[in-house]
């Protein structure tokens, strides 16, 4: 199993579905580093309401994609993250990034402003 180096948020999944070269290049770098990326189910589901379902599904078939599930026992941490970000999809993406000690790829950097000056965000 590859180590997860990146978590995609909803805006990044939507950008991927819309053929963003920035997202594509970033995922290629993850693959070249023999690492993996993920996106929580909440992110994939929300992105599929705003982009073509087949293209979101294609992302989950990427060579470097690794599905993960948030353990139910992590609900207090998820609640804290949700208290800061006010969106369940972003809160779960952030929590996974913190768990895997990596960054969130996002097109909505302002969403993470409550985290302060140096959030673990890579902006596309």
Image (cartoon, helix red, strand yellow):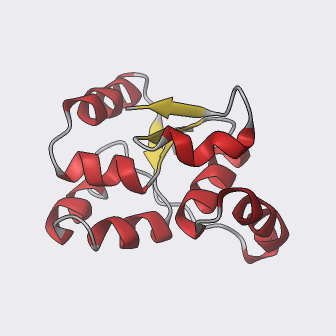
Residue extending furthest toward the right = 76
In-front residue for pair 114/12: 114
Residue 99 placement, left or right of 58: right
Q: Looking at the picture, does residue 92 appear above or below residue 123?
A: below
Q: Position of residue 51 (x, y in %)?
A: 21, 64
Q: Where is residue 29 in the image (x, y as percent from the top left)?
A: 35, 24
Q: Looking at the picture, does residue 110 appear above or below residue 77?
A: above
Q: Count the marks.
A: 0
On-image quarter of the C terminus = top left
Residue 93 placement, left or right of 31: right
Residue 58 placement, left or right of 30: left
Residue at (64, 33) in percent of width and height: 120
Residue at (24, 34) in percent of width and height: 24
Residue 16 placement, left or right of 2: left
Residue 70 occupies quadrant: bottom right
Q: Where is residue 88 in the image (x, y as percent from the top left)?
A: 59, 69
Residue at (15, 67) in percent of width and height: 54
Q: Where is residue 67 in the image (x, y as percent from the top left)?
A: 47, 60
In-front residue for pair 86/51: 86
Residue 81 occupies quadrant: bottom right
Residue at (27, 29) in percent of width and height: 22
């Amino acid at each position: 199993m590859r180590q997860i180096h990146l978590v995609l948020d909803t805006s990044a999944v939507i950008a991927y579905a819309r053929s963003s070269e920035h997202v594509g290049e970033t995922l290629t770098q993850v693959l070249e580093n023999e690492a993996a990326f993920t996106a929580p189910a909440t992110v994939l589901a929300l992105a599929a309401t705003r982009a073509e379902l087949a293209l979101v599904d294609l992302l989950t078939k990427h060579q470097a994609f690794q599905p993960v599930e948030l353990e139910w026992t992590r609900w207090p941490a998820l609640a804290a993250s949700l208290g800061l970000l006010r969106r369940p999809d972003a809160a779960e993406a952030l929590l996974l990034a913190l768990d895997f000690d990596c960054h969130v790829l996002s097109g909505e950097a302002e969403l993470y402003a409550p985290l302060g000056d140096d959030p673990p965000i890579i902006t596309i």
